[in-house]
Amino acid sequence: MKIGVVGLQGAVHEQIEATKRAMLRSGIQGEVSWVSRAGQANELDGIIIPGGESTTIGKLLVATGLFEKVKQKAMAGTPVLGICAGMIVLAKEGDERTMHAGQPLLGLMDIKVIRNAFGRQRESFEVDLGVPAFGKEPFRCVFIRAPVIEKVWRDVETMARYQGKIVAARQHNLLAMAFHPELTPDTRAHEYFLRMCKG
């Protein structure tokens, strides 16, 4: 199995290490690579778009050719995980701030997102949430300038909420999380994504 982490901006190293730990705990043989050019994505079985600054990530995706490549792969069925900023990039619709920033959106997932829904950096927080797809034990969620999903349509499955707001969702081969699972020792979120990649 080959998993690629889009390495243009944001928490790339942490994503790579968390995915490697998840592979180890799942008994999966595979490799995790840093992807910064379109050609590197050809053989990937799964793609992770990490947290960071969503407008910057979106514009760099376009500049490197990865925007169209990730879109093509996703539409062909390759699983894609978008975390925090990555969730915004996956969305079909953003809020006014997203539009004003000239944010390129892949437009893959039937969700509308709101940027910085809980405030700025100093309002970052951690909380234990129930995410049934990850198992019975609560999952430690780290929110950093986190977005939320304001609206879903078609067949998007809501996976977790916080204060009534959707913070994790799945639509077929697309998985979106507002929190940062790579910043905790718990690998269940990445293990779940790896299972999606196995098919």
Image (cartoon, rainbow, N blue to C red):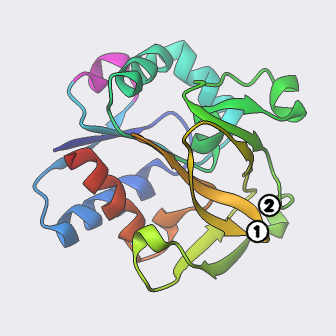
Residue tagged by mark 2?
Answer: 121
The structure residue drawn at horizontal position 83% and vertical position 67%, both measured from the top left corner, is: 122
Total numbered badges shown on the rendered structure: 2
Residue tagged by mark 1?
Answer: 124
Q: Nearer the viewer, residue 99 or 110?
A: 110
- Tell me if 84 is positioned left or right of 11 in this view: right
Check disc 1 and give the amino acid type.
Ser
| In magenta segment, residue 165 | no
Q: Nearer the viewer, residue 84 or 197?
A: 197
- Tell me if 99 is positioned left or right of 157 in this view: right
Q: Nearer the viewer, residue 35 or 143?
A: 143
- Residue 78 on image: x %, y %: 32, 32
Q: Residues within 10 Å of mark 2 (few under 14, many from 20)?
A: few
The structure residue drawn at horizontal position 80% and vertical position 61%, both measured from the top left corner, is: 121
Locate residue 27: give its quadrant: bottom left
Looking at the image, which residue sits at the far bottom? 137
Find the magenta span and give its range.
36-42
Do labels 2 and 1 touch, CB within 8 Å?
yes
The structure residue drawn at horizontal position 35% and vertical position 23%, both measured from the top left corner, is: 73
